[in-house]
Image (tube, rainbow, N blue to C red):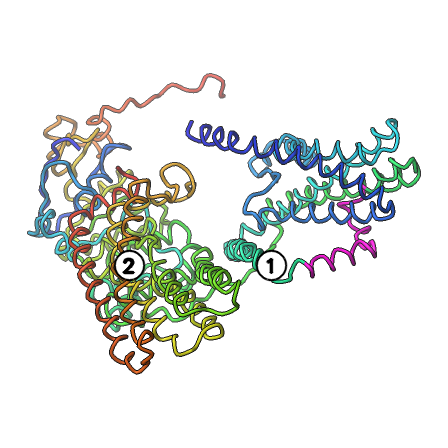
């Protein structure tokens, strides 16, 4: 029932967007083809081939690029024990895909494209047939890639790499505006013009049906038959490949990701004390968990983005901008002190360890995971601002972090996130990774309070700049850090008392047993 | 749970039995500080649970039914982590880890991440972690589920020896013949209420079942199970 409701809400949100993009895409396809025909009919074939190939590759790799498959490679493993031929399963999966929202949304675009390619009404059925053949090949190719990814993901190590790559690609995509504004658009344009000019994409099977459609529109029957035949053969080949993959993957005959046993390093926990042990555990777990490892790199994105914004006009970073940036990076401690634990929190609180130690260890882990962001800021600032400012920037960020981490402990205890059950949907129901509106409101208040409390400490760190006496940093920087340390100690002591009182409630909420 | 009250003497092998959903795991969660009871109290090894939670956690070892192990640690790392968190020295942790891994036949898998372990290996790793600090009370929720027969025998022999050395066992299981073999005393709960407690002989006498009745017979009688005996109409 809950899943059906989720699906209904998802569809309700998706449909208007799909409808709009389908209509807009149809208009654009028609206008682009007619425009290209009028401008230079010779570029229509390579241009359509290039676009079809781009769309085809993106569609095939959509699970990696977007984290969501645009069409499904149905998991037929549960059907294998029924007496059905494999090709029937492949065909059923392909037909099933024709009802996917993204596929339905593509149909008006293809119809509009076919209409634009048809120089006479009689040619339209043939141009449409060619376009649909391309779509069918795209679905068949996506099925092959989906099955390959599915087969590979049966190996945990490959799945880890894939998750890391997906997040890494997301990170690169988020950097795309910076790349495009920095001259990347011109480079991409040159590459596209080169590909269209040479028509190298003629060899791409994603375009063969559409090339047939172009020839059909021009009344070239022989060329239409040739390209359409090639596309039909490609579809049959992809379907056969899918059938072979299904058989071999699900019968365990295909070792897609190779063997190889993962050997971890030394098992002994090197860091001293229980805080050290807990920190070391967190770091080992974080480094081996692809999603958490990716956050190490993602933490660089915020400073890079803000550095780009702050230096866009002058190309330099002013001391005030650097001070603000250091506070922003430091305040990023707002997250979830127990986020790394998940359901392991029941284990953690099973150990007879004083709760303040757990909080300090968790804050240290959080700081270590955000260290790349601070290092990025300092490295970039060393090029964009006077290097004499770097110690003040580092201490400013560290002081803000201490205050923010101390405050975040309260939010983590009072509004914990529900951890997904083993094998459960990590994004569904109560496990949506959200701490709710109460936590958002309290988090917002704590964020403001962090900035208010940290501001005098950051001001103290930067004070020597006002007097232009850098030597005063010998006094001001340790003082700022000591002040932040004192605030942190008070906050942690209070949070530990709250944790002792609410430990059972916290566990019940994280484990979803309330 | 509905007014459940019982006492387990030190060094006893205590079986806590009941059908699915009876409240066995809930009781263990309450006794180990994972769930807060709405009322009532518990004392373990002289420490009141509500007031001295950390002291209780020092003396107990827990093998939960759900095994939320740190999947991105190796089995060996996990045991090192557990040992250090219980305050053992590095050397002592290493010694006990090596011994536990050998004892539970996990030596070959010591360098593998727990995420790649089978259910049985996870269970053995969690059991090793529950034992590493030499607890005085062991809470074992379905300890033999998913463990192969050889390891099962090794584990039951170990548990029996631990009980002989004075470690108190609080044990739940659906496998009643294992419970009958291991437990000195059992309690049977049904829908959150305690329906019987004592040695098997005492329960047999209280409930007027024959002296040759097995624990399974007694259990089925006490929880009023409706065991269907008719066949499916279309089979055969």
The residue closer to the viewer here, B170 or A285, is A285
Q: Residue at x 23, y 73 (%)?
A: A479
For mark 1, does the 10 Å Cα neighbourhood hold few (<14), some (14 to 19), or many (20 or more) residues?
few
Whether residue B151 can be seen here: no
Q: Residue at x 73, y 48 (%)?
A: A53
Q: Position of residue A477 (x, y in %)?
A: 28, 75
Whether residue B31 can be seen here: yes
Q: State which quadrant residue B157 falls in.
A: bottom left
The residue closer to the viewer here, A370 or B131, is A370
Label 2 vs 1, first from the N-terminus: 1
B40 in relation to A279, above or below: above
> For residue A486, which numbered disc appears in the image?
none
Q: Position of residue A455 (x, y in %)?
A: 28, 62
Q: Which residue is mark 1?
A: A181
Chain under numbered label 1:
A
B166 in relation to A71, above or below: below
Q: Residue at x 26, y 41 (%)?
A: B173
Chain under numbered label 2:
A
A473 in relation to B85, above or below: below
**Is A200 contained in the magenta span?**
yes
Q: What secondary structure is the stretch in magenta mostly built from?
A: helix
Q: Position of residue A38 (x, y in %)?
A: 85, 42
Q: Which residue is mark 2?
A: A405
For mark 2, does the 10 Å Cα neighbourhood hold few (<14), some (14 to 19), or many (20 or more) residues?
many
Q: State which quadrant residue A197 falls in.
A: bottom right
Image: magenta residue range: A186-210
């Amino acid at each position: 029932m809950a899943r059906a409701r989720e699906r209904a809400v998802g569809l309700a949100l998706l449909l208007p967007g799909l409808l709009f993009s389908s209509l807009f895409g149809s208009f654009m396809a028609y206008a682009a083809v007619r425009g290209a025909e009028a401008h230079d009919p010779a570029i229509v074939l390579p241009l359509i081939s290039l676009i079809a190939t781009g769309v085809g590759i993106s569609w095939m790799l959509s699970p990696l690029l977007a984290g969501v498959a645009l069409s499904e490679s149905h998991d037929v493993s549960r059907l294998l024990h029924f007496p059905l031929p494999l090709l029937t399963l492949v065909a059923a999966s392909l037909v099933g895909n024709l009802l996917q929202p993204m596929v339905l949304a593509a149909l008006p675009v293809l119809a509009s494209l076919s209409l634009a390619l048809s120089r006479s009404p009689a040619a339209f059925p043939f141009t449409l047939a060619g376009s649909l053949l391309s779509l069918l090949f795209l679905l068949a190719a996506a099925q092959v890639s989906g099955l390959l990814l599915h087969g590979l993901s049966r190996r945990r190590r490959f799945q880890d790499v894939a998750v890391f790559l997906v997040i890494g690609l997301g990170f690169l995509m988020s950097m795309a505006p910076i790349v495009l504004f920095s001259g990347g658009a011109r480079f991409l344009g040159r590459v596209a013009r080169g590909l269209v000019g040479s028509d190298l994409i003629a060899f791409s099977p994603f375009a063969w049906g559409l090339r047939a459609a172009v020839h059909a529109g021009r009344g070239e029957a022989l060329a239409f038959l040739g390209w359409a035949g090639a596309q039909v053969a490609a579809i049959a080949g992809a379907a056969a490949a899918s059938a072979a993959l299904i058989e071999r993957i699900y019968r365990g005959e295909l070792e897609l990701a190779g063997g190889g046993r993962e050997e971890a390093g030394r098992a002994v926990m090197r860091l001293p004390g229980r805080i050290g042990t807990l920190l070391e555990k967190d770091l080992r777990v974080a480094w081996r968990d692809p999603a958490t490892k990716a956050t190490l790199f993602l933490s660089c994105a915020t400073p890079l983005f803000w550095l780009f914004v702050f230096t866009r006009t002058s190309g330099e970073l002013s001391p005030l901008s650097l001070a603000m940036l250091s506070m922003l990076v430091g305040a990023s401690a707002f997250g979830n002190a127990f986020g790394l634990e998940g359901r392991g929190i029941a284990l953690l609180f099973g150990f007879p360890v004083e709760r303040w130690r757990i909080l300090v260890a968790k804050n240290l882990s959080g700081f270590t995971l955000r260290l790349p962001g601070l290092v990025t800021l300092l490295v970039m600032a060393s090029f964009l601002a006077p290097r004499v400012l770097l110690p003040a920037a580092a201490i400013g960020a560290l002081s803000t972090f201490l205050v923010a981490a101390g405050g975040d402990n309260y939010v983590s205890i009072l509004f914990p996130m529900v951890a997904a059950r083993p094998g459960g949907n990590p994004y569904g129901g109560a496990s949506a990774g959200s701490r709710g509106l109460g936590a958002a409101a309290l988090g917002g208040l704590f964020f403001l309070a962090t900035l208010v409390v940290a501001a005098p400490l950051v001001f103290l760190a930067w004070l020597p700049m006002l007097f232009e006496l850098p030597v005063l940093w010998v006094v001001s920087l340790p003082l700022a850090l000591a002040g932040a340390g004192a605030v942190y100690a008070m906050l942690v002591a209070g949070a530990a008392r709250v944790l002792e009182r609410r430990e059972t409630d916290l566990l019940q909420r994280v484990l979803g047993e309330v | 749970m509905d007014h459940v009250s019982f006492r387990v003497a030190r060094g006893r092998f205590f079986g806590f039995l009941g059908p699915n959903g009876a409240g066995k795991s809930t009781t263990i969660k309450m006794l180990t500080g994972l769930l807060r009871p709405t009322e009532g109290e518990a004392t373990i090894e002289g420490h009141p649970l509500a007031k001295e939670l950390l002291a209780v956690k020092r003396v107990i070892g827990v093998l939960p039914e759900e095994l939320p192990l740190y999947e991105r640690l190796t089995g060996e790392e996990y045991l090192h982590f557990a040992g250090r968190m219980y305050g053992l020295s590095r050397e002592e942790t290493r010694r006990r880890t090596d011994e536990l891994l050998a004892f539970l036949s996990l030596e070959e898998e010591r360098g593998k991440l727990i995420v790649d372990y089978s259910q049985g290996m996870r269970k053995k790793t969690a059991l090793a972690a529950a034992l590493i600090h030499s607890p005085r009370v062991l809470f074992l929720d379905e300890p033999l589920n998913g463990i192969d027969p050889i390891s099962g025998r090794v584990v039951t022999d170990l548990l029996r020896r631990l009980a002989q050395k004075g470690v108190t066992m609080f044990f739940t299981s659906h496998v009643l013949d294992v419970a009958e073999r291991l437990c000195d005393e059992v309690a049977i709960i049904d829908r959150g209420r305690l329906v019987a407690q004592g040695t098997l002989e005492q329960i047999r006498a209280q409930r007027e079942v024959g002296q040759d009745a097995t624990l399974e017979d007694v259990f089925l009688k006490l929880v009023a199970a409706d065991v269907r005996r008719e066949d499916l109409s279309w089979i055969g």
